Amino acid sequence: MTAPSEPNWFTSSYSGGSGTECVECANVAYGVLIRDSKDRASSVITVGTGAWRCFVEGLRKD
């Protein structure tokens, strides 16, 4: 059995570049993972693909 790989975390280019004032996201097969960039060991929020798509589309409309 192969161990799951570590998610590829990223921050928005709008975050200011310091990496401490934003959330980090990672795309996975079943949706998107979200965590606090200041406390990477804390809880992770999982959002389904459809919900994430609606969220991003809503942001683009603003």
Image (cartoon, rainbow, N blue to C red):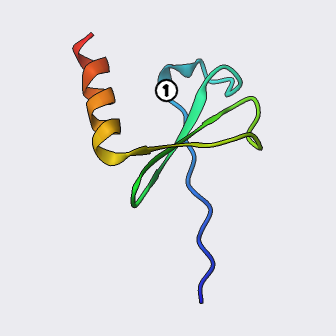
Q: Nearer the viewer, residue 17 or 45?
A: 45
Residue 13: where, in percent of width, then height? 49, 26
- Residue at 63% from the left image edge and 78% from the top image edge: 3
Say if 14 sits above or below 27 in the image: above
The quarter of the displayed image where residue 44 is located: top right
Residue 14, image x and y in percent?
49, 20
Instruction: Indicate left or right for 13 with 37 as reference.
Output: left
In which image quadrant can residue 39 be found? Answer: top right
Q: Residue at x 59, y 29 (%)?
A: 23
Q: Quadrant of the C terminus?
A: top left
Which residue type carries mark 1?
Ser
User: At which x and y percent is residue 60?
Assistant: 26, 19
Q: Residue furthest bottom?
A: 1
Judge left or right: residue 56 versus residue 40: left
Q: Residue at x 66, y 19 (%)?
A: 21
Please give the residue where the numbered disc 1 appears in the rendered image. Answer: 13
Image x and y of residue 26, in percent: 51, 47
Q: Residue at x 25, y 26 (%)?
A: 57
